[in-house]
Image (cartoon, rainbow, N blue to C red):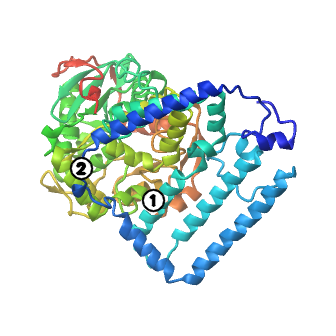
Amino acid sequence: MANSSSTNDKQSNPQGNSGNFTHDPSEFAGNMAKAAEKCQLIMQEFLSRQALDATNTPVDPLNIGNAFAELFTRLMSDPVGIVEKQFNLWQDYMFLWQKTTQKLLGEEQEPVITPDSRDKRFKDAAWEQNAVFDFLKQSYLLSARWMQQSVSGVEGLESHDARKIDFYTRQFIDAMSPSNFLMTNPEVLKATIDSNGENLVKGLENLLEDIERGKGSLRISMTDNTAFTVGKNLAITKGKVIFRNDLMELIQYEATTKEVFKTPVLVMPAWINKYYILDLQPENSCVKWLIDQGHTVFVISWVNPDESLSKKGFDNYMMEGPLAALDAIEKATGEKETSVFAYCLGGTLLSITLAWLHAKKQQHRVKSATYLTTMIDFSEAGELSVFIDEEQLKLLETRMSQQGYLEGSEMAMTFNMLRANDLIWSFVVNNYLLGKDPFPFDLLYWNSDSTRMPATMHSFYLRNMYQSNKLIKPGELNIGGVPIDLRTITTPTYMLSTREDHIAPWKSTYAATQIFSSDIRFVLAASGHIAGVINPPSKQKYCHWINDNLPKSADEWLANAKEYPGSWWPDWIKWQMQFAGEKVAARKIGEGKLKPIEDAPGSYVRVIV
């Protein structure tokens, strides 16, 4: 875009540029008529699928009203504080208006407030160059700061209410950003003028398709869903399904080396999403990388449950998951010891399994245990705890009892709300306002390929882990007829957490280092719950921190940790070598007692919600 030739040009052009827009009034009017038709179709589609008895719908299903009512009561008890905050906001506005007036007169001005350097909403040059849009941006940021400061630190609020208020205030603030609206987003305005409104027509078509795809609920497309197919360009590492039960398929992968380490590796992902986050494409497949390092790799591919599995509980997931997998691996390889590599909720289940095995005097079956971004102590569960209170749990359990499971889309929306600007509003702007198709991205395709949760298991998990935190209380959690005591675990342990994790906050995951009785190596990676884990060495991205000491305080651990560049994967390989055993001839699938059932990635992973 060309630079504007004068201040007047900047003021008259919403982009602050002198480009002349081609505007055909008849074409623009025609596109607006098409947009109106699309709006009508969208409303008809929405209303036809929302024919619910309003009397059966809770007025406040998230129980937000009571929390905010308590907030306002506390605020009104300090009228002086309210007046002071409002006066400060008024002063900020006046200061901003003075600077904006001077900027309109052509003077250079330092901003009153600037967005965070990681905030992508205001990256378009007009947000800074054009005085009007710069004023909109800064006034929004000032209001956002004022709202957050007003609701935070209010004395007397119960901690859960305070956390909920803070979370939903930020949801409101994010939703009200000027970048989310046609008339206050310079990039959208320019696209509308340039295309004579075609972007809005295309955006409404995208919106209608997403509502249809969500069967009446908005299911925002985050990637080009036609660009990927599981088994064709995702999850394509060669292997066979060698075992199957109601809850999982066990995949054994073909060796790529002439010799392999004697100890097999079992990869146990979470069942909240599908396993192929660990086997996306060859260049970022953790599974393939492990195989190429000489490991015999097995992966649990969890079923995408329907109503027939509604009664499956945590006991079933342990018995029919890792314990069944260990039995199958012994039949396939003859090895009685296996190293287990578990991700997220899979790691939580691994800790329970190890405590169960120790109680049964079978701890030798797991030679080493790896936990990736795993919650063990749920006392500080981060923002996910906002969704866990008695009212919300009862509503969720009522919904699950009607169909036998929790819809995968509901779980996906919960996680997306933790990063609303990146995972919701950026796509609203791109898909519906700019009318663009989302970019093909394997990780976001996986993120949208959600799975259901069986009612019995999910209720048990939320109540006993998130609500009551029974897992760290010796003997209070009974799984498979055994009181679980994590203090008995002596299995050598590798823990990987990520510094920007919104799902399993790293300081909360670190707490497990003070619970187990095993030798523990704790490593902290940069980035978040997914990108920090799926970080192949070849990309040379991010960094990680290591400290061989494990003080009680996570902050103290980090303060004395050494930073290393790049991926944590090579560090894990070095650690795992002490448990890998000697080299043996590469194993062939089917040479043991279990014969192949079908090619990887199997059938369970292909089930679409």
The numbered dot on residue 129 is: none
The numbered dot on residue 168 is: 1
- Quadrant that contains the N terminus: top right
* Numbered disc in front, either 2 or 1: 1
Which residue corresponds to the image point at 51% horizontal and 51% vertical from the top-left? 175
Q: Secondary structure at mark 2?
A: helix
Amino acid type, residue under disc 1 in the picture:
Tyr
Residue under numbered circle 2: 458
Amino acid type, residue under disc 2 in the picture:
His
Quarter assignment of residue 463:
bottom left
Q: Is residue 143 left or right of residue 569?
A: right
Residue 53 place in picture, x, y as percent: 22, 51
Quarter assignment of residue 13:
top right
- Quadrant that contains the C terminus: top left
Quarter assignment of residue 86:
bottom right
Residue 336 place in picture, x, y as percent: 22, 34
Q: Is 455 placed above or below 560 here? A: above
Q: Is 206 placed above or below 348 here? A: above
Q: Is 202 placed above or below 164 here? A: above
Residues tagged 2 and 1 counted as in contact (Cβ below 8 A): no
